[in-house]
Amino acid sequence: MTGGDWRLPPQPGEVIDRSRTVRFTFNGTAYVGHPGDTIASALAACGVRVFSRSFKYHRPRGILTAGWLDPNLMVQVGDDPNVRAGHRLVADGLDVRSQDTWPSLAFDVKAANQLVGRYLSAGFYYKTFIRPARLWPAYEAVLKRFVHGGQIDIDTPHRQHDKTYHHADVVVAGGGPAGMAAALAAAEGGTGVVLVDEDHDLGGHWRWDPEQASALLELRDAVRAHPRISAYTDSVVIGRYDGNWLGIVVRSPDGAERLVKSRAKVLVVTPGLIERPLVFAGNDRPGVMLGTAVRRLVNLYAVKPGTRAVVQTANAHGDAVVEDLRRAGVEIADVLDARQGRLVSAVHGRRGVESVEVAGGDRIEADLLVVSTGWTAPTSLLNMAGNRPVYDPEAARFFPGPLPQDVLVAGGLAGDGDAKQLTEHAAAVGAEAARRAASTARRMAAVPTRPDDAAALAVDEVEVPIPDLARHAHPELYRTTTHGFLDFSEDVSSKDLHQAVQEGYDSAELAKRYSTATMGPLQGKLETVNAVAAVAEALGSTIADTGTTTWRPPYAPTTLGALAGRSLEPVRVSPMQDWHQAHGAVPLVAGAWIRPDHYGDPVAEVRNVRTNVGIIDVTPLGKLDLRGPGVPDLLELLYVNKWRQLAIGGVRYGVMCAEDGVVFDDGVTGRLGPEHYLMSTTSGGAAAVWEWVENWLQTGGRGWAAHCTPVTTAYASINVAGPHARELLSRLTELDLTAESFGYMQVRVATVAGIDDVVVWRIGFTGELSYELHVPAGYGQHVWEALLTAGADLGVAPFGIEAQRILRLEKGHFIVGQDTDGLTQGFSAELDWAIKLDKADFAGAPELRWQHERGPITRLVALQPLEESSVPPEASQIVTERTEIIGRITSSRHSPTLDRSICLAQLLTEHAVAGSVVRVLTPDGKIVEARVCEQLAHYDPEGGRARA
Amino acid sequence: MLDCPFCGPRNVGEFAHLGEVVARPDPRTATPAQWRDYLYVRDNVAGVVRERWLHRAGCRKFFDAVRDTTDNTVHETVALTAGEGAGS
């Protein structure tokens, strides 16, 4: 057990609780920290300097930024890989391990990579491990050991990731001083504010700035106390989409992520600035860290970062870092001020910094080199809003370009100044954000139909004046006099970028992809500007002219589970579903519907329908109630056949084609009254046909007086089929069911089983005498049970979808989408009898006319395999002797009624010759010969049974 | 957000985008080439387009929008009157 030898006395802004300790292990060794420590700060307090090994060259790596964006602090915590040790708080019992360090962090065999480094330069995987090809399995086995990242445990229990909405008037992305000031001003302006910050607490860089301690407390307390501000810490805005549609990822202490979706009227972007590493030889050695790392370690965690330091500075931040180091008792060996032209050229040392070489010759002994030489503006969210950032060479960073009306910027992203100037600017931005949000709210609340909208919108629209921010000059500093690491995660050096440009990858986008620079877990936040500078240097151009790569969501790496959320699948069931389930129905998933496939023995169900009587629940059948004098015109347009002569009480079968002549849907439509029709569609097509009908009514320009109401779920539908169907139904209704009174293809409205307004159709998908009852849905189960009770002595039994499919196949009735596909035009579905080309106009008419002129290319036929027990699988191809495809099986079953196999198929017309034999190629390679039948119906081709 | 002419501004996820508004040729006189243009060919401009939308999860009305495809700004949404639409 090692103690905190590097822990400093209490610091004014520290976030650790010294009264308690936390025990955890790192690579099996026990360590002690305090609540509030990150894993990295607790380990650093115990003197740990090497945290990981790098990706390609397996170089030892230490703290670089000490925060979320530290590329060297990715560790495995329990079964969680790629945890950021610079952010994750310690907790009792954590099992922390370094990643990708075999056999150990201390001694890494793969460091031998360094010796062959020149073969591992940019794009090496395009050039190496290619020949001989027979060694690819060996290459793969070796390369797998070198793949970066932690371990996945496939037995890890699944997490539940919840999603929620939190729509806000103003969302402020970034909770530093500017963000807090903007949020407060916006809230004071009367709007609701969501404030998002990636760190454990609000405050941004003021948290480690002792000079701002009291200002921070005041501002943060005000924000926390304000009723209209909701602050999400440990959270990040991962994307901004059209209309300020935002994704916010909220992280819990153990790393679980949840997604909050927000439509913000105004987005204020205040991410601050990200300190950028400097490129020079040895810049990745443990002991080289950014100024921000030192400020965090000393001020937040009271950790001494080293004993003897050299500071490379180019700005006021570096000056503040020197003060922090002095306060921490670190000896300052030298301060290299780039503003005076003094630059580090190299760092030497095997396992960490041992000496710092200054450009010009001096070598200074030190174990710590702190670098504060530049800032990167994180413009990602602005880029996602369509903004093109503009590089300012004087200030040496990018600034936002012109912004859309609903996005504002404050803080370091907008410009420079002292604390007062920046917070005043941010407050003005917040007030303006509130004004714009209120203006948007008024506009959205003005419902167009109200006559006094104009008055509501005429408000004082004077913008809040936002002060200008200065842009302080900053030396343009990316690389000193040597080459060094530019992307720590991908082990890409500035030399690799130069080489990429030399090889012809001479733009930022190309060089990025070829070298993989910026493509690591930091997504370029520490790397992009240096990479662009390297490319510009290699091209002899400027950063402004070279441009940057495109920033896309997500802004931060996001767990897939958070994006997926919970799996919520609604299902639709008929009112009789409980009965089906209780009576052994095997469920069939049909879109969102759960339907009974069968009740244990579909073959018995088929026999019962043909012999006695069966009932089937067909509630999902699409039903549209059509009213008005214009309905016959509508039907003439939608269907391929004629409808104007349909009498009241009559039913006609119709087929709909789309405008390309392809069969779209079919069903029966009945006339219930002078201007009242009821249309049925396929179950799967119910929604699509409703939309099709509405499209013609609303946009067809015909001006028909016709109205459509979907009643699919208003009725529970039961089909009663079989020789005893008339007898059974007569026991439950006064309706005259004699053949003379209620013939085939007729419809009536009657009282059945005591229920009024039941629509009774005499139709026949199964080919038996059958009545389809459309019962007001609430009474569906009652009528279902009444039928079963009344028909017990008749042998009534329920039948399911599977039995229905067999019954209809025996009759040769096609199913749209099963026996037809997306290319089957009307005349290819044996619908010659239905398509009335002499009609003035109907959907798809021109294409059907041309198909008729050409002759259809394929035809729908019935097939019977010569071997009666052979049931070729559906979708089996039909082939010639030379294995050319001439068709396929679309439906195929064994028929209990005929005791043989029966099929429907699509065949090229020239092969669709009745009596001829075709060859069906089954998926297991066998040939089944089948005879083409004279008509589609295998059973009762005259249709006498349905017309009984 | 999309401004439904009947419901006001609603989340765009409530709507179905149905594509450029194209006139239906006269089915009695159109040539196959003209009919297939109507079925399949679109101008696909980088600029302002008039297109058909449906408020599928709302009032279920079809309407037109005038949208700039280069920056996704919807300039206006237009309720269809009885005589309008592709078929007129």
Image (cartoon, rainbow, N blue to C red):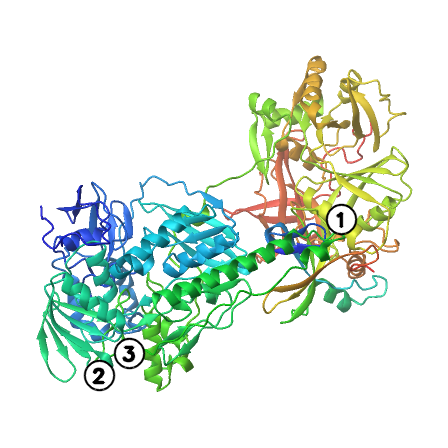
C-alpha separation, residue under disc 3 versus residue under disc 1:
65 Å
Disc 2 is attached to a residue of which chain? A
Q: Nearer the viewer, residue A261 or A683?
A: A261
Under mark 2, the amino acid is Gly
**Residue behind mark 2:** A341
Closer mark to the observer between disc 3 and disc 1: 3
Badge 1 crowding class, 10 Å Cα cut-off, few under 14, some 14 to 19, many 20 or more, is some
At horizontal 77% and vertical 27% (from top left) the residue drawn is A771
Where is A623 relative to A698, above or below? above
Q: Earlier in the sequence, mark 1 or mark 2?
A: 2
Disc 3 is attached to a residue of which chain? A
Label 2's element?
loop
Under mark 3, the amino acid is Leu
**Residue behind mark 3:** A477
Q: Are marks 3 and 1 in contact (CB under 8 Å)?
A: no
**Residue behind mark 1:** A694
Mark number for residue A593?
Answer: none
Q: Position of residue A129 (x, y in %)?
A: 27, 68
Give the quarter of the image for residue A287: bottom left
